[in-house]
Amino acid sequence: MAEICEGMIFAEMAAEIGETKAALILDRAIRKAAIAEGRQFAKRSPGGVTSMADFIKLYELWTADGALEMQVLEATDERFDFDITRCRYAETYKEMGLGKIGHLISCNRDGTFCEGYDPNITLERKQTIMQGASCCTFRYTYKAKG
């Protein structure tokens, strides 16, 4: 399980260089990995052309088996707004003792994944369950290529 490995790596780095520097390194690494993963998913889009509609379909991967309970507020070619009301990722990280870095391992991926998938898609999120809020607020916007 990658999360356990990331947790061990974080603990080792924190012991050597301190939690603040370790968190910065983990943050950068996870963001870079998410952008690279987004690019790989973009290559698999029909004809290699990305869209908000195809991006929305990707969420089936992350919500599979009830991993996320989601309330969709708007799903159009320009917007994908939803709230996560239950996050089994957050629950799992906390159970594993990784609650302190769960946002670095998981939540950081959300905004940077879309950078790699399609730079015209941006995320605004004001709160997450992982950091103690009652829900996660996802507000994706597609800005047409200009």
Image: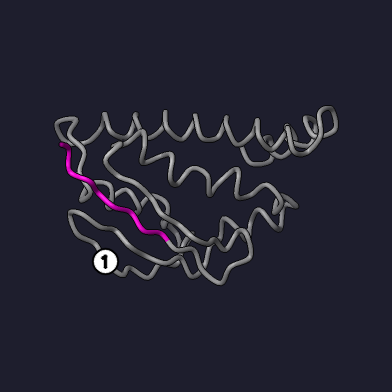
Where is residue 114? Give x, y as percent: 36, 41
Where is residue 48? Give x, y as percent: 19, 30
At 45% from the left edge and 65% from the top edge, which residue is drawn?
84
Part of the protein shown in magenta: 138-146
Where is residue 129? Give x, y as percent: 57, 63
Q: Please, what is the three-letter code of the amino acid marked with disc 1? A: Glu
Residue 22: say if magenta: no
Total labels: the figure holds 1
At 59% from the left edge and 43% from the top edge, which residue is drawn?
105
Q: Is residue 22 left or right of residue 52?
A: right
Relative vertical location of residue 72 with respect to residue 54 in this rendering, above or below: below
At 26% from the left edge and 66% from the top edge, which residue is drawn?
74
Q: Name the outermost residue toward the front.
A: 146
Q: Is residue 38 left or right of residue 93?
A: left
Q: Name the outermost residue toward the right.
A: 15
Q: Quadrant of the C terminus?
A: top left
Where is residue 119? Give x, y as percent: 30, 36
Residue 139: say if magenta: yes
Could you say which is closer to the camera, residue 127 or residue 86? 127
Q: How is the image coloured?
A: one colour
| Residue where numbered disc 1 is placed | 74
Report crowding for label 1: few under 14, some 14 to 19, many 20 or more residues within 10 A (C-alpha). Answer: few
Q: Which element is circle 1 on?
A: strand
At 20% from the left edge and 51% from the top edge, which residue is drawn?
53
Q: Quadrant of the N terminus?
A: top right
